Image (spheres, rainbow, N blue to C red):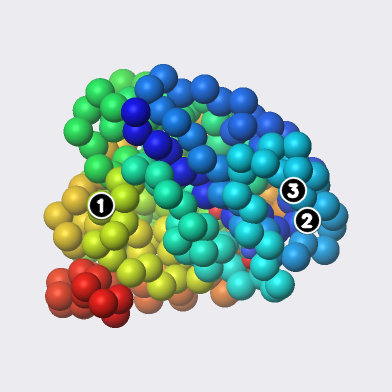
Amino acid sequence: MKKLSIVIPVYNEKNTVEDLLNKVYDLKIKDIEKEIVIVEDNSKDGTREIVKSFCKKHPDCKLILRKNPRGKGYAVRVGLKKATGDILAIQDADLEYDVNDYHKLLRAFTEGQAKFVLGSRHLNENGDKVHMIRKFHGKERLYAYLMNFGGIFLHKFFNVLYGTKISDPTTMYKLFTRDLYEKVELEGSYFELDWEIVAKFVRLGYFPKEIPIKYESRGLGEGKKVRLRRDVTKWLGTIIKFRFLPKSKILKTQNGK
Ligand SMILES: Nc1nc2c(ncn2[C@@H]2O[C@H](COP(=O)(O)OP(=O)(O)O)[C@@H](O)[C@H]2O)c(=O)[nH]1
Ligand SMILES: [Mg+2]
Protein backbone atom coordinates (compact mmCIF):
# COMPACT_ATOMS: atom_id res chain seq x y z
CA MET A 1 0.00 0.00 0.00
CA LYS A 2 1.28 3.48 -0.87
CA LYS A 3 1.80 6.07 1.83
CA LEU A 4 0.65 9.66 1.36
CA SER A 5 2.25 12.46 3.39
CA ILE A 6 0.12 15.56 3.74
CA VAL A 7 2.22 18.58 4.70
CA ILE A 8 0.20 21.36 6.35
CA PRO A 9 1.84 24.79 6.80
CA VAL A 10 -0.07 26.83 9.33
CA TYR A 11 0.24 30.34 10.67
CA ASN A 12 -2.51 32.35 12.39
CA GLU A 13 -5.41 30.13 11.30
CA LYS A 14 -7.40 29.82 14.53
CA ASN A 15 -10.76 29.98 12.75
CA THR A 16 -10.18 27.08 10.40
CA VAL A 17 -7.26 24.94 11.51
CA GLU A 18 -9.10 22.56 13.84
CA ASP A 19 -11.87 21.93 11.36
CA LEU A 20 -9.34 21.38 8.59
CA LEU A 21 -7.19 19.02 10.68
CA ASN A 22 -10.22 16.95 11.65
CA LYS A 23 -11.28 16.72 8.02
CA VAL A 24 -7.83 15.61 6.88
CA TYR A 25 -7.45 13.19 9.81
CA ASP A 26 -10.83 11.56 9.20
CA LEU A 27 -10.23 11.15 5.51
CA LYS A 28 -9.97 7.50 4.45
CA ILE A 29 -8.54 7.04 0.99
CA LYS A 30 -8.75 3.69 -0.79
CA ASP A 31 -5.42 1.83 -0.90
CA ILE A 32 -3.61 4.70 0.79
CA GLU A 33 -1.95 4.97 4.19
CA LYS A 34 -1.77 8.54 5.43
CA GLU A 35 0.77 10.63 7.34
CA ILE A 36 0.07 14.18 8.50
CA VAL A 37 2.95 16.63 8.98
CA ILE A 38 2.03 20.02 10.48
CA VAL A 39 4.46 22.94 10.42
CA GLU A 40 3.44 25.76 12.75
CA ASP A 41 5.40 29.00 13.04
CA ASN A 42 4.56 30.42 16.46
CA SER A 43 1.21 31.98 15.54
CA LYS A 44 0.01 34.98 17.48
CA ASP A 45 -3.66 34.02 17.55
CA GLY A 46 -3.73 30.78 19.55
CA THR A 47 -3.25 28.46 16.56
CA ARG A 48 -0.22 26.87 18.25
CA GLU A 49 -2.30 25.74 21.23
CA ILE A 50 -4.96 24.34 18.90
CA VAL A 51 -2.48 22.26 16.89
CA LYS A 52 -0.70 21.10 20.04
CA SER A 53 -3.89 19.82 21.60
CA PHE A 54 -4.92 18.21 18.29
CA CYS A 55 -1.61 16.34 18.10
CA LYS A 56 -1.89 15.27 21.72
CA LYS A 57 -5.18 13.59 20.84
CA HIS A 58 -3.70 12.18 17.63
CA PRO A 59 -0.08 11.27 18.40
CA ASP A 60 0.35 9.70 14.97
CA CYS A 61 0.54 13.25 13.52
CA LYS A 62 3.97 14.83 13.18
CA LEU A 63 4.13 18.35 14.58
CA ILE A 64 6.97 20.73 13.86
CA LEU A 65 6.88 23.85 16.01
CA ARG A 66 9.06 26.66 14.67
CA LYS A 67 10.10 29.91 16.32
CA ASN A 68 9.23 32.47 13.64
CA PRO A 69 7.17 32.69 10.45
CA ARG A 70 9.44 32.55 7.41
CA GLY A 71 6.77 32.15 4.76
CA LYS A 72 4.54 29.36 3.50
CA GLY A 73 7.23 28.06 1.15
CA TYR A 74 9.77 27.73 3.93
CA ALA A 75 7.29 25.86 6.12
CA VAL A 76 6.38 23.53 3.26
CA ARG A 77 10.04 22.75 2.64
CA VAL A 78 10.58 21.95 6.33
CA GLY A 79 7.53 19.67 6.27
CA LEU A 80 8.53 17.88 3.06
CA LYS A 81 11.94 17.08 4.58
CA LYS A 82 10.23 15.34 7.53
CA ALA A 83 7.66 13.53 5.40
CA THR A 84 8.21 9.83 4.80
CA GLY A 85 5.46 9.04 2.27
CA ASP A 86 5.80 7.70 -1.28
CA ILE A 87 3.45 10.47 -2.42
CA LEU A 88 3.78 14.00 -1.04
CA ALA A 89 0.98 16.57 -0.88
CA ILE A 90 0.68 20.18 0.29
CA GLN A 91 -2.45 21.16 2.21
CA ASP A 92 -3.27 24.66 3.48
CA ALA A 93 -4.91 25.06 6.87
CA ASP A 94 -7.84 27.11 5.58
CA LEU A 95 -10.99 25.77 4.00
CA GLU A 96 -10.65 27.15 0.47
CA TYR A 97 -10.33 23.65 -0.99
CA ASP A 98 -12.34 20.48 -0.36
CA VAL A 99 -10.41 17.57 1.19
CA ASN A 100 -12.79 15.11 -0.48
CA ASP A 101 -10.96 15.91 -3.69
CA TYR A 102 -8.05 13.79 -2.41
CA HIS A 103 -9.92 10.70 -3.59
CA LYS A 104 -9.73 11.61 -7.24
CA LEU A 105 -6.30 13.20 -6.95
CA LEU A 106 -4.90 9.97 -5.50
CA ARG A 107 -6.56 7.78 -8.11
CA ALA A 108 -4.17 9.28 -10.65
CA PHE A 109 -1.36 7.61 -8.67
CA THR A 110 -3.03 4.37 -7.60
CA GLU A 111 -4.91 3.60 -10.83
CA GLY A 112 -2.76 5.59 -13.21
CA GLN A 113 0.95 6.04 -13.45
CA ALA A 114 1.04 9.70 -12.46
CA LYS A 115 4.12 11.17 -10.81
CA PHE A 116 2.91 14.76 -10.59
CA VAL A 117 -0.73 15.82 -10.13
CA LEU A 118 -2.32 19.24 -9.81
CA GLY A 119 -5.89 19.84 -8.64
CA SER A 120 -7.12 22.50 -11.05
CA ARG A 121 -9.58 25.24 -10.15
CA HIS A 122 -9.84 26.21 -13.80
CA LEU A 123 -11.11 22.98 -15.36
CA ASN A 124 -14.73 21.91 -15.40
CA GLU A 125 -15.86 18.32 -14.84
CA ASN A 126 -15.43 17.58 -18.57
CA GLY A 127 -11.85 18.74 -18.41
CA ASP A 128 -12.52 21.92 -20.40
CA LYS A 129 -10.59 25.01 -19.44
CA VAL A 130 -12.98 27.47 -17.79
CA HIS A 131 -11.17 30.17 -15.85
CA MET A 132 -12.69 30.45 -12.38
CA ILE A 133 -13.00 34.03 -11.15
CA ARG A 134 -12.63 34.58 -7.40
CA LYS A 135 -15.58 36.08 -5.60
CA PHE A 136 -15.20 39.73 -4.68
CA HIS A 137 -15.16 40.70 -1.02
CA GLY A 138 -16.52 44.22 -0.38
CA LYS A 139 -13.54 46.50 0.21
CA GLU A 140 -11.12 44.05 -1.34
CA ARG A 141 -12.41 44.63 -4.85
CA LEU A 142 -9.09 45.92 -6.18
CA TYR A 143 -7.17 43.00 -4.64
CA ALA A 144 -9.66 40.58 -6.12
CA TYR A 145 -9.41 42.14 -9.59
CA LEU A 146 -5.63 42.06 -9.47
CA MET A 147 -5.56 38.45 -8.18
CA ASN A 148 -7.96 37.34 -10.89
CA PHE A 149 -6.60 39.16 -13.91
CA GLY A 150 -2.98 39.14 -12.77
CA GLY A 151 -3.39 35.39 -12.34
CA ILE A 152 -4.61 34.96 -15.91
CA PHE A 153 -1.61 36.94 -17.16
CA LEU A 154 0.90 34.95 -15.08
CA HIS A 155 -0.56 31.59 -16.11
CA LYS A 156 -0.30 32.61 -19.77
CA PHE A 157 3.23 33.95 -19.27
CA PHE A 158 4.29 30.66 -17.67
CA ASN A 159 2.70 28.52 -20.36
CA VAL A 160 4.26 30.48 -23.20
CA LEU A 161 7.71 30.34 -21.61
CA TYR A 162 7.57 26.65 -20.71
CA GLY A 163 5.61 25.40 -23.72
CA THR A 164 2.88 24.00 -21.47
CA LYS A 165 -0.90 24.18 -21.28
CA ILE A 166 -1.27 24.05 -17.50
CA SER A 167 -4.58 25.56 -16.41
CA ASP A 168 -3.68 26.10 -12.74
CA PRO A 169 -0.01 26.14 -11.78
CA THR A 170 -0.68 28.01 -8.50
CA THR A 171 -3.22 25.59 -7.08
CA MET A 172 -2.60 24.47 -3.52
CA TYR A 173 -3.24 20.84 -4.54
CA LYS A 174 0.19 19.74 -5.71
CA LEU A 175 0.96 16.06 -5.28
CA PHE A 176 4.12 14.34 -6.44
CA THR A 177 6.01 11.15 -5.88
CA ARG A 178 9.00 11.00 -3.57
CA ASP A 179 11.35 10.00 -6.38
CA LEU A 180 10.38 13.14 -8.29
CA TYR A 181 10.75 15.33 -5.18
CA GLU A 182 14.20 13.90 -4.60
CA LYS A 183 15.39 15.01 -8.01
CA VAL A 184 15.25 18.70 -7.03
CA GLU A 185 16.27 20.95 -4.15
CA LEU A 186 13.49 23.45 -3.49
CA GLU A 187 14.48 26.93 -2.34
CA GLY A 188 11.51 29.35 -2.35
CA SER A 189 10.26 30.61 1.00
CA TYR A 190 7.06 32.46 0.16
CA PHE A 191 4.32 31.79 -2.34
CA GLU A 192 6.80 31.61 -5.23
CA LEU A 193 7.47 28.01 -4.19
CA ASP A 194 4.26 27.16 -6.07
CA TRP A 195 5.79 28.30 -9.35
CA GLU A 196 9.16 26.75 -8.53
CA ILE A 197 7.73 23.27 -8.01
CA VAL A 198 5.90 23.31 -11.35
CA ALA A 199 8.76 24.98 -13.19
CA LYS A 200 11.39 22.52 -11.97
CA PHE A 201 9.35 19.38 -12.64
CA VAL A 202 8.37 20.61 -16.10
CA ARG A 203 12.01 21.46 -16.90
CA LEU A 204 12.87 17.86 -16.04
CA GLY A 205 10.16 16.63 -18.40
CA TYR A 206 7.49 15.77 -15.82
CA PHE A 207 4.25 17.39 -16.91
CA PRO A 208 1.41 17.49 -14.38
CA LYS A 209 -1.80 15.57 -14.75
CA GLU A 210 -4.51 18.13 -13.95
CA ILE A 211 -7.69 17.07 -12.23
CA PRO A 212 -10.65 19.43 -11.68
CA ILE A 213 -11.28 20.29 -8.02
CA LYS A 214 -13.55 22.56 -5.97
CA TYR A 215 -12.47 25.94 -4.60
CA GLU A 216 -14.02 28.70 -2.46
CA SER A 217 -11.77 31.71 -2.18
CA ARG A 218 -11.27 33.64 1.06
CA GLY A 219 -10.23 37.28 1.33
CA LEU A 220 -7.49 39.20 3.16
CA GLY A 221 -9.91 39.92 6.00
CA GLU A 222 -10.41 36.18 6.45
CA GLY A 223 -6.67 35.59 6.77
CA LYS A 224 -5.37 35.24 3.23
CA LYS A 225 -1.62 35.89 3.34
CA VAL A 226 -0.68 36.47 -0.29
CA ARG A 227 0.59 40.06 -0.57
CA LEU A 228 0.68 41.39 -4.10
CA ARG A 229 3.43 43.94 -3.45
CA ARG A 230 5.74 41.34 -1.90
CA ASP A 231 4.81 38.30 -3.93
CA VAL A 232 4.28 39.36 -7.56
CA THR A 233 7.93 40.25 -8.23
CA LYS A 234 9.00 36.97 -6.61
CA TRP A 235 6.55 35.08 -8.86
CA LEU A 236 7.87 36.70 -12.04
CA GLY A 237 11.48 36.25 -10.93
CA THR A 238 10.91 32.57 -10.16
CA ILE A 239 9.16 31.85 -13.46
CA ILE A 240 11.98 33.47 -15.43
CA LYS A 241 14.85 32.08 -13.34
CA PHE A 242 13.91 28.42 -13.56
CA ARG A 243 13.06 28.65 -17.26
CA PHE A 244 16.58 29.67 -18.17
CA LEU A 245 18.67 27.92 -15.51
CA PRO A 246 20.60 25.02 -17.07
CA LYS A 247 18.96 21.65 -16.44
CA SER A 248 22.07 20.50 -14.59
CA LYS A 249 21.34 23.19 -11.98
CA ILE A 250 17.71 22.13 -11.67
CA LEU A 251 18.71 18.55 -10.89
CA LYS A 252 19.87 18.01 -7.34
CA THR A 253 23.43 16.75 -7.22
CA GLN A 254 24.08 13.64 -5.20
CA ASN A 255 25.62 15.41 -2.20
CA GLY A 256 22.95 18.13 -1.91
CA LYS A 257 23.60 21.30 -3.95
N1 LIG B 1 3.97 27.79 8.93
C1 LIG B 1 3.64 28.82 8.14
N2 LIG B 1 2.51 28.77 7.40
C2 LIG B 1 2.20 29.82 6.61
C3 LIG B 1 3.00 30.99 6.53
N3 LIG B 1 2.40 31.85 5.66
C4 LIG B 1 1.27 31.24 5.22
N4 LIG B 1 1.14 30.02 5.80
C5 LIG B 1 0.08 29.03 5.62
O1 LIG B 1 0.04 28.71 4.25
C6 LIG B 1 -1.28 28.39 3.86
C7 LIG B 1 -1.68 29.24 2.66
O2 LIG B 1 -1.91 30.57 3.02
P1 LIG B 1 -3.05 31.42 2.34
O3 LIG B 1 -2.96 32.78 2.87
O4 LIG B 1 -4.36 30.71 2.46
O5 LIG B 1 -2.55 31.40 0.83
P2 LIG B 1 -3.32 31.21 -0.55
O6 LIG B 1 -4.54 30.42 -0.32
O7 LIG B 1 -2.33 30.56 -1.44
O8 LIG B 1 -3.62 32.59 -0.99
C8 LIG B 1 -2.15 28.61 5.10
O9 LIG B 1 -2.35 27.38 5.76
C9 LIG B 1 -1.29 29.54 5.94
O10 LIG B 1 -1.57 29.47 7.32
C10 LIG B 1 4.20 31.03 7.33
O11 LIG B 1 4.96 31.99 7.34
N5 LIG B 1 4.44 29.93 8.11
MG1 LIG C 1 -5.60 29.75 1.23
CA distance for labels 2 and 1: 32 Å
Number of marks in the rendered image: 3
Residue 128: image tag:
none
Residue 179: image tag:
1
Residue 79, given in percent of the width and then of the height, sits at: 52, 58
Say if 54 sits above or below 27 in the image: below
Q: Is mark 1 within 8 Å of ligand 1?
A: no
Mark 3 and mark 1 lie on one chain; the one further toward the N terminus is 3
Q: Secondary structure at mark 1?
A: helix
Q: Quadrant of ligand 1?
A: bottom right
Q: Secondary structure at mark 3?
A: helix
Q: Quadrant location of residue 91?
A: top right
Say if 82 sits above or below 114 in the image: below
**Towards the viewer: 224 or 209:** 209
**Towards the viewer: 233 or 143:** 233
Q: Secondary structure at mark 2?
A: helix
Is the residue marked by circle 3 packed among few (<14), some (14-19), or many (20+) residues within 10 Å?
Answer: many
Residue at x-position 72% and y-position 34%: 19
Mark 2 and mark 1 lie on one chain; the one further toward the N terminus is 2
